[in-house]
């Protein structure tokens, strides 16, 4: 006997039309789940790139690249597993029928992909160019290709890059909102499914998207940093937690308004819809989705002193809650028969016994949910997403390209510079630009009164210097041993590269690896 | 080749725009524009179901499945018959066992035994695709694989359907399903292959009680035209705005 599509996982109760089955299965829940994660992760990275939220810098690149990995997987539930004729997927490009909410999918998706791809490229360009110069073999070739022929690393070019990243991130926010709001519209416009048909759907989807994406970034960041044994920046976690809490509130309001409206207007279908909501999915919806997925994490995040563990648990609960929400919408929506006189239950195939149960079952879902992490790991090999653990060195904390004076600069002028630039010391260089001494406030104040003194006459020489890769511990040691307040950082030729003062060292100790 | 980033960005924008614009031009090639060119615009196929005449024998379902090669034993069908039983207590019991392909032979709605004296009202309602004038199924097909012909019949192109199921979701009447063999969206076609050759739909021919009639709605000579214009007929779920073209005589308010 030939079974009908959908029959293998649908259990019918009371009266449903003969042709009714759960046609949109778990993949249609996974699909908006993944696009939602994309949107959320992207918004998080934009908070740094566009709005300059400094604390988010450690996760800005990570969430950007992660959103790209998720984006690649987002359409796969449909393309690989859901369509009964996957080989024809490209028909959407050949004959798009724009009255359909999913016809523009390919276009919206590719446009968004282009934006995120370009942003990543600009954000990583200096790294790519460095690698292209430094690496040999296959990887060298890969990086060379990735430069796209653009090797310019001048200050001006880098500045332009930064600007472009900012612009792309700014365009990206409405695009991310559109991409996901649009997914909501795909459901909201299905007039035959009472639970879906609401103009709020795009907004409900968008908000739950953002909370799931931010939660995923928090959780992955924490796990990733632990895994690579790096320092988790408390400020970053707290800041992400705040973003998460804010969006949870909006998401919760929208979702509850929807239900309140349905119940108050009590249209024809409310009778059966209320049975679905208050009996059939009540636990999933009110306990897992709202209680554990929103209210509990919200309280956890709003209580003071959010730590890593609490942020992680809250995020995990949110992720779970949003997945259950997608499930409730997709499966719960269909579980109510269009006859208004019966129900359908969905039993996801766990152990596959034919092609159909393989494609539409647990195995496929696991594949879809694991792949973004696999992709993230692969991308991480090419474009490192987590801040390097290298131990802090002079180059991380020094003031770059300090002002210098020459041996011939008159003392009056040196004093002027110290006062006007509000600095306490300055390197002295000779005619070859080599550092030969250092001048501090005290040198200037306690100089012997004499005419036409130059820097050379009162400077401390030879200066105490170190290289850019000198570690924080060594710097501290030098300062203590020599009782000095600042160390000049030079390159191998002895040219001034920077200056490290005591306050820089103190700050670095304070912030650990979270200093940027 | 050396490219500045500005040039690259420009190229990126152009290629995105370059894909979007020609793609939208393709929309002009709507399949319905090509379908049934040979039929005049005035033609509009319609259907009348006289529910008062249906005895629930299921011959129409049998005929349809055989005629249209929907595997007979599969639990989906282009047409089906529903049984409504209202009891003294006001309970409404509805069923359509195996789409009624074997007819209703016992008093066992939903497998329950109900005493004859407890039944206050009972009747059958044949169902099929309504060939809606505003078909919500066609509206949502992303690739235009399903379309309405000029003479008002909604068809599916089996060679183009990608099987997304959007149309199946968006039909308020449950008329659509996936063909168990072809795995593409499937539905009643009013037996388009027969009616365009002057024959009647298979279910109409199979009904010994005259419960099903097919014809041209705008043709004053046709029986459906006469019934629709002189009798009190109703359509299913008018609130969805689909403007169904299957008209019912004797439709009860409990029928959805
Ligand atoms: S009854 Fe359903 S399948 Fe038939 S035309 Fe109307 S919406 Fe489409
Ligand atoms: S299942 Fe086929 S006919 Fe139906 S909307 Fe999808 S592509 Fe179109």
Image: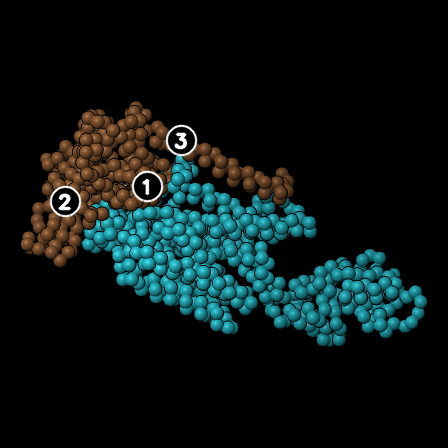
The colour scheme used here is by chain
Residue at (41%, 55%) from the top-left corner? A204
Q: In this view, does A29 lie above or below A238?
A: above
Q: Is residue A230 above or below residue A46?
A: below
- Say which of A393 and B137 sits in front: B137
**Quarter of the image where one finds residue B182:** top left
Residue identifier under label 1: B136
Q: Residue furthest toward the right?
A: A451
Q: Which element carries disc 3, helix, strand or loop?
A: loop
Residue identifier under label 3: B29
Which lettered chain is shown in brown? B
Q: Inspect this view and state whether residue A272 appears.
A: yes
Residue identifier under label 2: B124
Picture coordinates of residue B41 (x, y %)?
Answer: 31, 26
Residue at (8%, 55%) from the top-left corner? B118
Residue at (43%, 33%) from the top-left corner? B26
Q: Which of marks 1 and 3 is in front?
A: 1
Q: Which element carries disc 2, helix, strand or loop?
A: strand
């Amino acid at each position: 006997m030939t079974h009908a599509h959908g029959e293998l996982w649908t259990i019918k109760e009371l009266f449903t039309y003969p042709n009714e089955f759960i046609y949109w299965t778990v993949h249609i829940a996974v699909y908006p789940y993944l696009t939602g994660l994309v949107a959320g992760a992207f918004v998080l990275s934009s908070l740094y790139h566009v709005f300059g939220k400094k604390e988010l810098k450690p996760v800005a690149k990570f969430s950007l690249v992660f959103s790209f990995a998720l984006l690649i997987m987002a359409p796969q539930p449909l393309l690989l597993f859901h369509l009964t004729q996957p080989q024809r997927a490209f028909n959407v490009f050949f004959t798009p029928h724009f009255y359909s909410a999913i016809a523009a999918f390919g276009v919206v998706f590719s446009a968004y992909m282009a934006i995120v791809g370009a942003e990543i490229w600009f954000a990583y360009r200096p790294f790519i160019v460095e690698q292209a110069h430094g690496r040999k073999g296959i990887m060298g070739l890969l990086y060379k290709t990735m430069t796209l022929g653009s090797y310019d690393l001048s200050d001006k070019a880098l500045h332009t890059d930064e600007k472009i990243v900012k612009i792309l991130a700014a365009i990206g926010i409405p695009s991310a909102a559109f991409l996901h709001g649009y997914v909501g519209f795909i459901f909201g416009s299905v007039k035959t499914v009472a639970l879906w048909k609401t103009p709020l759907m795009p907004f409900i989807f968008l908000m739950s998207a953002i909370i799931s994406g931010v939660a995923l970034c928090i959780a992955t960041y924490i796990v990733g940093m632990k895994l690579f044994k790096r320092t988790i920046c408390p400020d970053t976690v707290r800041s992400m937690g705040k973003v998460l809490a804010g969006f949870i509130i909006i998401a919760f309001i929208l979702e509850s308004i929807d239900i309140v409206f349905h119940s108050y207007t009590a249209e024809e279908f409310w009778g059966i819809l209320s049975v679905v909501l208050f009996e059939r999915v009540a636990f999933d919806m009110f306990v897992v989705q709202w209680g554990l997925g929103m209210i509990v994490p919200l309280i956890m995040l709003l209580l003071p002193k959010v730590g890593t563990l609490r942020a992680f648990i809250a995020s995990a609960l949110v992720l779970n809650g949003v997945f259950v929400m997608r499930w409730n919408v997709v499966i719960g929506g269909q579980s109510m028969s269009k006859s208004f006189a019966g129900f359908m239950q969905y039993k996801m195939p766990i152990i596959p016994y034919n092609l159909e149960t393989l494609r539409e079952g647990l195995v496929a879902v696991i594949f879809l949910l694991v792949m973004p992490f696999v992709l993230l790991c692969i991308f991480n090999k090419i474009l490192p997403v987590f801040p390097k653990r290298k131990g802090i060195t002079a180059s991380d904390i020094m003031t770059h390209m300090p002002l210098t004076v020459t041996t011939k600069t008159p003392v009056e002028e040196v004093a002027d510079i110290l006062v006007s630039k509000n600095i306490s010391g300055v390197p002295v260089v000779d005619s070859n630009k080599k550092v030969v001494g250092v001048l501090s406030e005290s040198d200037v104040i306690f100089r012997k009164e004499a005419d036409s003194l130059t820097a050379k006459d009162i400077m401390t020489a030879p200066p105490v210097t170190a290289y850019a890769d000198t570690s924080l511990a060594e710097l501290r040691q030098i300062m203590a041993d020599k009782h000095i307040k600042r160390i000049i950082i030079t390159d191998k030729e002895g040219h001034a590269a920077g200056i490290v003062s005591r306050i820089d060292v103190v700050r670095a100790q304070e912030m650990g690896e979270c200093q940027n | 080749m050396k490219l500045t980033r500005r040039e690259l960005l420009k190229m990126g924008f152009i290629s995105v725009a370059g894909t979007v614009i020609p793609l939208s031009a393709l929309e002009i090639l709507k399949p319905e524009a090509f379908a049934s060119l040979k039929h005049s615009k005035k033609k509009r196929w319609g259907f009348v179901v006289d529910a008062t005449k249906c005895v629930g024998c299921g011959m129409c379902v049998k005929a349809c499945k055989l005629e249209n090669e929907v595997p007979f034993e599969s639990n989906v069908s282009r047409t089906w018959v529903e049984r409504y039983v209202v009891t003294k207590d006001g309970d409404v019991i509805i069923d359509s066992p195996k789409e009624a392909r074997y007819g209703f032979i016992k008093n066992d709605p939903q497998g329950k035994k109900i005493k004859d004296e407890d039944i206050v009202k009972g009747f059958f309602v044949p169902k099929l695709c309504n060939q809606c004038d505003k078909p919500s199924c066609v509206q949502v097909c992303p690739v235009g694989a399903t379309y309405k012909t000029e003479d008002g019949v909604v068809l599916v192109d089996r060679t183009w359907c990608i099987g997304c199921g959007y149309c199946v979701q968006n039909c308020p009447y449950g008329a659509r399903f996936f063909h168990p063999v072809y795995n593409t969206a499937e539905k009643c076609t009013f037996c388009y292959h027969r009616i365009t050759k002057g024959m009647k739909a298979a279910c109409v021919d199979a009904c010994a009680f005259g419960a099903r009639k097919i014809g041209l709605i705008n043709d004053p000579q046709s029986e459906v035209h006469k019934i629709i214009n002189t009798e009190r007929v109703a359509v299913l779920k008018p609130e969805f705005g689909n403007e169904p073209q299957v008209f019912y005589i004797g439709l009860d308010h409990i029928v959805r």
